[in-house]
Image: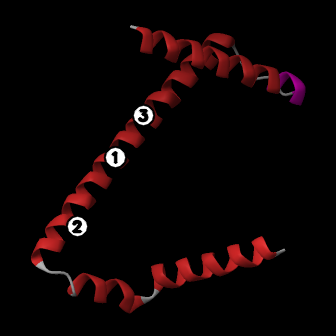
Amino acid sequence: MFEVILLVIVMFVMATCAFFPLGYSMAYFSKSPQQSTAANQVEWTADYELRILEESNRLLTHLISEIEASFGPRPSDSVLRRHYDTLVAAELENRLAATMAE
């Protein structure tokens, strides 16, 4: 119970910091030029990492759809669907391992 209360308090504090209107503007205007340059570098790095994540997600999604197309339609039965998902995951892992070995 204590963990739940602690989690709720932490989430409340994070939401308050994220959505408090003066919190962001005061932090933005109080930066020196050197700090804002460092902040721009961090933002650029974060944007670059986000772009890489989006690209890798797109490629993985394409690879999964390619694998599913080779296996045929997805079953409607829950047990068969679990087995199908396991086969797709195993094939994805095999293809990624083969790509890494090259």
Between disc 1 and disc 3, the foreground one is: 1
**On the image, which quarter does residue 42 sit in?**
bottom left
Label 2, secondary structure: give it: helix
**On the image, which quarter does residue 52 sit in?**
top left
Badge 3 or badge 2: first in the primary sequence: 2
Of residue 54 and residue 65, the one placed in the foreground of this image is 54
The residue carrying mark 2 is: 39
Q: How far apart are marks 2 and 1 (CA)?
A: 15 Å
Q: Which amino acid does label 3 sit on?
A: Ser
Which portion, as a residue range, is magenta?
77-81
The residue carrying mark 1 is: 49
Badge 2 or badge 1: first in the primary sequence: 2
Image quadrant containing the C terminus: top left
- Please determine whether, in this image, residue 29 is positioned above or below residue 90: below
Badge 1 or badge 3: first in the primary sequence: 1
Q: What residue type is labelled 1?
A: Glu
**Residue 11: x percent and y percent?**
62, 75
The residue carrying mark 3 is: 56
Q: Dot 2: few (<14), some (14–19), or many (≥20) neighbours within 10 Å?
A: some
